[in-house]
């Protein structure tokens, strides 16, 4: 039996004063992808993505759109020779805080009206978030959005669009939102082990437009969910401020049985893959209809007891499971207990799939590689986000180790059109076994690589490296290949290096370099 955790929270708070001011917008970074300038939309500032990503192409969507942020997008051209490549937005955040990340996609036929929407992956830091498939929504003229909750494990979060082999159409993104959450929200999840990907969030019995900010202080989307048995209400409630902070507006309507009998319904309204899910259900009874009656019922999920004898009052209740196994269609059943005089009801629900975090490149290695990136010019377009993770999405030319401690073990950027210099931080990549940077236009001196005790192969040939011939190479114990030909090195090749057993050394084409006789 998997570990299940159920908690009942009973919150009793006073009615909100009608004199409260309009709530402030959430602490958020709102990115209008493909836009050339910032703009004010519904009182909130959306920034252009031009300073956040250096690759991709800005495109305008032809025709009318329902929302201004859907009028532009950023498209990422596929490379037929590279089947898996990620393109990342790297966003500054506060370490240790939870963030809601929402990505929005509206295809608009930008790859050709006869070309169906692309299907591709999305990634947060080193974790595979899920597959983006907008086909059904686009056929209905709608945008698609994906929402997740992740812990900031560093000073930045990377959100990546990743090409795969599902389709041959260019991936894209229309908008990206990164919203900081209150510390109490979803606090039962072990965010150092899991992220959460939204499956469904509904206001039961509600049939209007999506409920969002300012009703929801974090601008979460609460979609309508209305069945024949719904009962809209203008109710007297005392509920506000559950630890997940749902908007009080979702308690204005409910889904309830017609009489004191079980209420059974399918939610969410789509089959689920076999996984573990976070489930939260919200309940509140209005005082007028409650009167002297009682509303007590059992809650089950697919026939399995979820909570026993839940008593619902105007103060409100929430029950949740932090890790519940589900697969296929899910049926919720609210069964009145003996003696209950009122029909069971439910006001709202949230469901997230738990995503196991995929690991991260060792911080020291990632920091060093980013320093190398800054010293290079014309780096590969996918050199953003985590260098190694997820697997199969490492940076072009970067090979990483397996296991819990993920290290960079090889660099191969041969003939990549690089210029600039090789940063001295390469010496901090202490797990490197090979450095292949041949046939580029790199210049400056060769940094001291004497600390790289696992280094076996160095190819720096056909560049513009200058300065005195490095003397440290004779102290690299495992070195077997050293190709430095066709550069501008000066001085003498150390005799110890010439006599190093098993070393293949090439230094020709350095016109000012001399070699002692062997």
Image: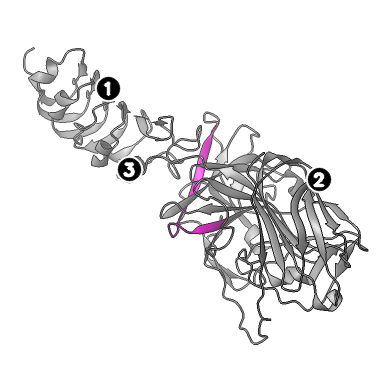
The structure residue drawn at horizontal position 80% and vertical position 56%, both measured from the top left corner, is 298
Q: Residue furthest bottom?
A: 19
Pointer 3 local density, CA inside 10 Å: few below 14, some 14–19, many at least 20: few
Q: Which residues are magenta?
A: 84-100
Q: Looking at the rendering, which quadrant does residue 402 occupy?
A: top left
Q: Looking at the rendering, which quadrant does residue 466 occupy?
A: top left
Q: Is residue 242 above or below residue 85?
A: below
Q: Kindly identify which numbered label has been placed on residue 247.
A: none
Of pointers 1 and 2, the one earlier in the residue sequence: 2
Which residue is the site of mark 3?
A: 364
The percent coordinates of residue 375 (x first, y second) are: 30, 44
Look at the image and tell me in which quarter the C terminus lies.
Answer: top left
Q: Is 321 situated left or right of 478 in this image?
A: right
Which residue is the site of mark 1?
A: 456
Of pointers 3 and 1, the one earlier in the residue sequence: 3
| SS at badge 2 | loop
Instruction: Using the numbered discs, state the Cα–Cα distance from disc 1 to disc 2 in whole angstroms.
Output: 61 Å
| SS at badge 1 | loop
Which residue is the site of mark 2?
A: 303
């Amino acid at each position: 039996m998997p570990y299940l955790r159920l908690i009942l929270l009973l919150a009793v708070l006073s009615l909100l004063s009608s004199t409260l001011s309009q709530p402030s917008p959430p602490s958020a970074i709102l990115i209008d992808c493909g836009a050339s300038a910032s703009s004010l939309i519904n009182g909130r500032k959306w920034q252009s993505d031009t300073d956040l990503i250096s690759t991709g192409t800005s495109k305008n969507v032809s025709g009318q759109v329902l929302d201004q942020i859907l009028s532009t997008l950023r498209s990422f051209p596929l490379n037929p020779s590279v089947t898996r490549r990620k393109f990342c937005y790297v966003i500054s955040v506060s370490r240790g805080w939870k963030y809601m990340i929402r990505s929005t996609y509206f295809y608009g036929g930008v790859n050709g009206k006869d070309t169906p929407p692309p299907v591709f992956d999305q990634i947060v830091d080193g974790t595979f978030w899920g597959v983006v498939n907008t086909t059904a929504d686009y056929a209905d003229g709608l945008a698609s959005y994906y929402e997740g909750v992740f812990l900031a494990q560093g000073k930045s979060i990377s959100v990546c669009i990743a090409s795969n082999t599902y389709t041959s159409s260019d991936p894209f993104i229309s908008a990206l939102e990164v919203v900081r959450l209150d510390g109490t929200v979803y606090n039962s999840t072990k965010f150092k082990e899991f992220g959460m990907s939204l499956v469904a969030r509904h206001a039961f019995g509600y049939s209007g437009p999506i409920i969002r900010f300012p009703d929801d202080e974090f601008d979460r989307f609460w979609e309508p969910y209305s069945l024949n048995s719904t009962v809209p209400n203008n109710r007297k409630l005392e509920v506000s401020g559950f630890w997940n902070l749902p908007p009080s507006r979702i308690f204005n309507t409910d889904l309830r049985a017609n009489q004191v009998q079980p209420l059974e319904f399918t939610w969410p309204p789509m089959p689920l893959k076999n996984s573990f899910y976070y489930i939260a259900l919200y309940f509140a009874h209005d005082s007028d209809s409650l009167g002297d009656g009682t509303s007590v019922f059992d809650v089950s999920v697919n026939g399995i007891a979820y909570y026993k004898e839940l008593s619902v009052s105007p103060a409100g209740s929430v029950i949740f499971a932090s890790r519940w196994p589900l697969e296929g269609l899910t049926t919720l059943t609210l069964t009145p207990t003996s003696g209950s005089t009122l029909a069971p009801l439910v006001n709202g629900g949230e469901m997230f799939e738990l995503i196991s975090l995929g690991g991260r490149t060792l911080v020291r290695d990632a920091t060093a590689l980013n320093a190398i990136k800054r010293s290079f010019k014309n780096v590969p377009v996918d050199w953003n986000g985590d260098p190694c993770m997820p697997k199969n999405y490492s940076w072009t030319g970067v090979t990483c180790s397996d296991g819990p401690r993920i290290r960079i073990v090889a660099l191969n950027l041969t003939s990549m059109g690089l210029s600039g210099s090789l940063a001295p931080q390469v010496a901090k990549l202490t797990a490197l076994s090979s450095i292949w940077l041949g046939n580029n236009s790199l210049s400056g001196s060769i940094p001291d690589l004497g600390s790289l005790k696992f280094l076996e192969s160095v190819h720096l040939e056909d560049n513009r490296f200058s300065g005195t011939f490095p003397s440290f190479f004779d102290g690299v114990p495992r070195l077997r290949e050293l190709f430095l030909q066709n550069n501008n090195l000066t001085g003498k090749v150390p005799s110890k290096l010439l006599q190093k057993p098993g070393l293949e050394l090439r230094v020709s084409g350095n016109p000012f370099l001399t070699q002692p006789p062997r």
